[in-house]
Amino acid sequence: MIAGLDPLIHPPKRLAAMALLAHAQSVDFPFLRDHLQVSDSDLSKQMSALAAAGYVRIDKQGRGRGSVTTFRITKDGRRAYRAHRQALQDLLDQVPARIDQPPG
Amino acid sequence: MESDDELNEQLRMADRAAVAPYVEYPKDPWWAAPGFGVYCAVWAVLVGLPDGAGRAWEIATVVLMIVMVAFLGAYFGYQRRRWGAFPRGKPPREIAVAYFAWLVYFLTFMGVVWVAAEQWGLVFAVPFAFLGGTAGFWVYGLVYERAAGRLRRRVA
């Protein structure tokens, strides 16, 4: 993995999830699932991985069909997302320099 | 090594996700616009009540002010529950313009209602406030939707 890129956030769906969470007070499960266009189980898996890393907090209220699950980005998650995004931008900005460098 | 096209697409995907709280939102319920009209009408009553109208009016004024504040809190709480992703932080420029337009309208219209209440009394000011508030809220909905459309096109 290229320096600066976070392997946990790099997969496209996780990057999109983190970008969304970084600009919302909280995001509920159906909204995130519909925006990412993933299944319930896929979303649960992705968000569990981010929560295990401390990037996301998962709140569940209620039980059964009436339960509501919401996600919030943590301070660590916000920092990680910003760093990853900056690393992506830096890579993009370096593309002309990489092309100009002689091989070897 | 990822190509610059792939990197660009990743950043654009992140941009689209970042603006989702502003552009993927539920329509206002039918009662929101006339509800704001009622709010403005209550404001007209508050500013149009004659001075020295008696203790009962003073108490009514305080109660109405509390109701107005409570209504705002309840409305924002209700919206937060409806919006699957309530926006946070600095809004995109298209949305910031819409917010500013709303602020200008709100302050200006409340001032106009105050003047109307003082100059022409409650008989004129209350219906004026209700109709103007209802119309203003409805127009703001259109303004916001146009701003959201411009934002969607920018990040597409």
Image (spheres, coloured by chain):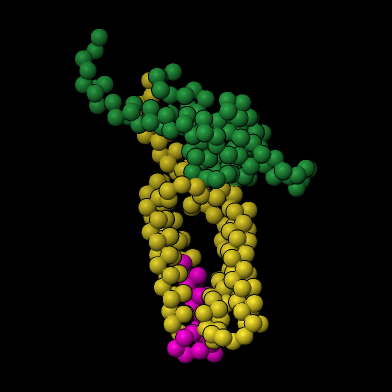
The image quadrant of residue B97 is: bottom left
Q: Nearer the viewer, residue A35 or B59?
A: B59
Residue at 40% across / 19% down in the picture?
Answer: A2
B45 left or right of B55 in image: left
Residue B57 in the image: x percent, y percent?
Answer: 62, 82
B1 left or right of A64 in image: left
Whether A100 is drawn above or below B34: the answer is above
Q: Which residues are magenta?
A: B117-140
Residue at 56% across / 86% down in the picture?
Answer: B52
Residue A59 in the image: x percent, y percent?
Answer: 66, 39
Residue A63 in the image: x percent, y percent?
Answer: 78, 42
Does the magenta-highlighted stretch encompass residue B123? yes
Residue B77 in the image: x percent, y percent?
Answer: 62, 56
Query: Looking at the magenta stretch, what is its main secondary structure?
Result: helix
Does the magenta-highlighted stretch encompass residue B69? no
Quadrant housing the N terminus of chain B: top left
Whether A103 is drawn above or below A41: the answer is above
A28 left or right of A85 in image: right
The image quadrant of residue A101 is: top left
The image quadrant of residue B42 is: bottom right
Whether A20 is drawn above or below B118: the answer is above
Whether A96 is drawn above or below A34: the answer is above
Q: Residue placed farthest to the top in the image?
A: A104
Q: Residue placed farthest to the right in the image?
A: A64
Q: Is residue A35 visible?
A: yes
Q: Is residue B41 visible?
A: no
Residue at 60% across / 77% down in the picture?
Answer: B61
How many numbered marks are there? 0
Q: Nearer the viewer, residue A99 or A30?
A: A30
Chain letter, colour green:
A
Colour seen for chain B: yellow
Residue at 52% across / 79% down in the picture?
Answer: B47
